[in-house]
Image: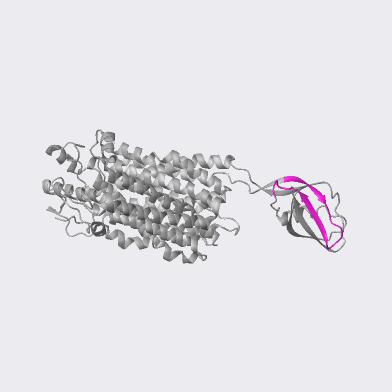
Amino acid sequence: MAPKAETDEPLTGKNETIKTNGNTGTGGRLINPHLVLLKVSLFLIFGATSSLVPYLTVHMQSIGLSVEEIAAVYLTLLFTTCLSPPITGYVVDRFGRYKPVLLVSLVLNLAAHHSLNLVPIRAPWVLKTVQVEAVWNAIGNGTITLENPCDNLECPTVPFLEKSLANRCDLPAGNLSQLQLFISNGEERTFCGSLNLPNCNSRLDGSNAPLILQCRNTVEYDKTFWYYLMIRFVSTTMLIGCLTITDPIALTMIEQYGGDFGREKLFSSAGMAIFTPLTGLLIDYYSEDPNSTDYTPAFYIYDVLLALSLISVFLLPVGKKLPSESILRHLWDILKLPHVLMFLFFLFYLGTFWGFIESYLFVIMKEMGSPNYLLGLTYTVGTVASIPMMYLTGPITRWAGHVNLLVVAFFAHATRIIGYSLMDNPFWCFPVELNEAISCYFMWVVATTYCAVLAPNSLVATLIGVSGMVHFCLGKGIGSVFGGYLIAQFGTRMAFRYMGYIAVVCGCSYKFLHLIWLKKYDKHQAGEIEDRKRDFPERRVSLVPKFSAFGSVAGMLPTSEEEHAKSCEGV
């Protein structure tokens, strides 16, 4: 009997009978009432995440952090948050409690992320006292040379200098004095432009006296950086914990009430499609100064959506799961399998490319002159394109196989990254962003359901947590850090191009290894699944069979009929 992955109806078995008006069944309902709050929770949590997280890189730039500092932030997050998914999964599997862990994570997540908006902005300019080396010769062709005004050859702002020098003019002469401004460090001289000083005669009063000028602030790792880093550490840790827990909750509720994992994840995509561009529009609307951007609306939308998600999660009808014993020993047994290790290894690289484009997509689009609403629409294009694919997750996965779909995700990433490196007009982003449906949304559904195949019921949350650590923390962190240094070294466009080439190489490598080595494990695994189906025909079926496929593999797990039955029971 094939899994009914194409319905949202509750699927019943020996462990559960759902009755409607005294009859067993659902009465032909198209919507499973037990999964409505799950849909709402996923919509709100992922909608909140997409309303703020994509804008955090450009927000860091807006408060004065340099590209090198942004890379340092992502490098630190790599080492401080990579343990959040496995620890979260371990706590859930060990104690069998989903809801309290998720509620605490949401509260801390909300408080910490809002605090990022309170980090003091680094002043872009500082005042320094400099010496005027020489002054003009005559009205109309005079010059001013400033000796090493800003410890570099960057020109001070002309309007500020005009205002400063206008107060030093002698008696008005009724003429417009035009001065040529130069800066010098003793070895080279740079022209900075012309100054216009109305009603000023041919000499400045006290021309050799010190002058206070604006110089660009080049201080790094000051209190702005350290405050931001500490708060971002806590907020990202809680965020990753929240997102990690949502997948095993969805899988558990589908086990209880039936349904399809891909269809539930559609509501995550819907939240991202709606709130990312909406946030961009509000940011543009409230940014009155064309030279600066106000990201406050993103933080408030995030607060409201997470507060609403607290209510929906609190009412979520997810029960306790059976606590698992000897988690670490059984997890180690899983991780010793070659195809599992290769899955995690290449999932890490998928996270690297995703982290790179997640962190620097808005940066390259800003360099093209993109408005903020267009930044948000990039998410809408990808999520809307993912809807038909997510709806058919089950049939597509059974037809193509998990590994082949992960290989396709590499090429989808390469298409996106190289595509942005070649375009000059940000409005060309729409055809490129169609690949996000494959490289991000569909890919993670495939990866999550693959975990459900690889792990026994008692370790699904733990393996998903490890996968989340590898993909969202290690992979994304390395991609963000490596990408930042690539951009600093080669420029934004060339960095994108190099990352795209690497993605192509990784995709070809995974497919090659699968053809010559890993393919035999797929056949063995398929045989194990069919054996379990025959042994336990009454077990409820969901998107992917989640029985223990390790019982007879090298004596990894107990193989008694009783323990097999326990591993096949719903949670």
Q: What residue is shown at x 84% (from left), y 48% (from top)?
A: 208
Q: Is residue 400 above or below residue 100?
A: below
**Residue at image coords 45%, 58%:** 417
Image coordinates of residue 343 in percent, x first then y, are: 31, 47
Residue farthest toward the front in the current orientation of the protein? 516
Could you say where residue 64 lies in the image, as x and y percent from the top left? Answer: 58, 48
Q: Is residue 358 magenta?
A: no
Q: Is residue 388 depicted above or below 470 in this figure?
A: below
Q: Does residue 325 appear left or right of residue 154 in this picture?
A: left
Residue 215 in picture, x, y percent from top left: 69, 48
Can residue 205 be seen in this snapshot?
yes
In the rendered image, which quarter contains the C terminus? top left
- Image location (x, y in percent) of residue 88: 34, 39
The quarter of the picture where the N terminus appears is bottom left
In the image, the segment drawn in magenta is: 128-152
* Residue 133 is covered by the magenta coloring: yes
